[in-house]
Image (cartoon, rainbow, N blue to C red):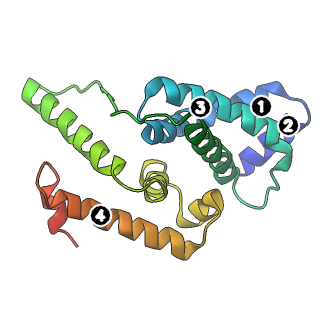
Amino acid sequence: MEEDIQLVQQILAGNKQAYIDIINKYNNPLYATILRMTKNHQTAQDLVQEAFIKVYEQLGKYDQKGPFKSWLYKVAINHCLDQLRKKKVILEQVENERMINEATPEIVFLKKEKSRELERLVSCLPEDERIILLLRYANDLSYEDICRTLGISLADVRNKLHRAKKKLRNQAQKGGYFHDLSKRG
């Protein structure tokens, strides 16, 4: 966190390399989050670039009271949601093909199907619950960081995360790869 604050101060003082360091540090996790929101690689790439421009333009508004990471995610997610609403982007299924170094084609196929099924289940959640779930588990943000990022209370974060997990369990009860998930508490 201290490193981020130093980078922000350097950027505000005119150091362009410090901003490149911020981009390099947060580009991949931010892209992963936005990709899960949009379900489209090209749209996610465009929105990440736009988000970094927005962050740069608003950097003077960062008050350094909370972690920079939370502030950055808040600016980026709000920008993404605004753009999705304005353009009324139709969300597509993620074709997130990963290089899997497994021995048999069957294992590769099953892993891809499992990943698609999980993405499908998560995409069925309401937007607010999906975003909280992604921030918590895909980006490893703390509950407090999620509160600051989304501007909601800790109770709201906990409740929405609980509801999201419960909905995933209920969907898993209907069968598929995650049927065993529904049997857990």
Is residue 162 depicted above or below 103 in this figure? below
Q: How many angstroms separate mark 1 from mark 4 (CA)?
A: 42 Å
Which amino acid type is shown beneath numbered disc 2? Answer: Gln
Residues at marks 2 and 3, CA–CA distance in whole angstroms: 25 Å
Q: Quadrant of residue 52?
A: top right
The residue at which mark 3 appears reads as: 47
Q: Secondary structure at mark 2?
A: helix
Furthest-bottom residue in this view: 155
- The quarter of the displayed image where residue 100 is located: top left
Please tell me which of labels 4 and 3 falls first in the chain.
3
Query: Residue 72 vs residue 65: left or right?
Result: left
Is label 1 or label 4 in front?
4
According to the image, label 4 marks what residue? Answer: 167
Of the image marks 1 and 3, the number of the one nearer the N terminus: 1
Work out which quarter of the rendered image holds the C terminus and state it. bottom left
Numbered disc 1: secondary structure: helix
Q: Residue at x 63, y 57 (%)?
A: 149
Pick the front one: 162 or 8? 162
Q: Which mark is residue 72?
A: none
Compute the Cα span from label 4 to label 2: 45 Å
Residues at marks 1 and 2 touching, judged by CB atoms closer than 8 Å: yes
Label 4: how many Cα within 10 Å (few below 14, some 14–19, many 20+): some
Q: Indicate which disc, 2 or 3, sits on the residue closer to the N terminus.
A: 2
- Which mark, by number, is residue 10? 2
- Tell which circle, 1 or 2, labels the residue nearer the N-terminal end: 2
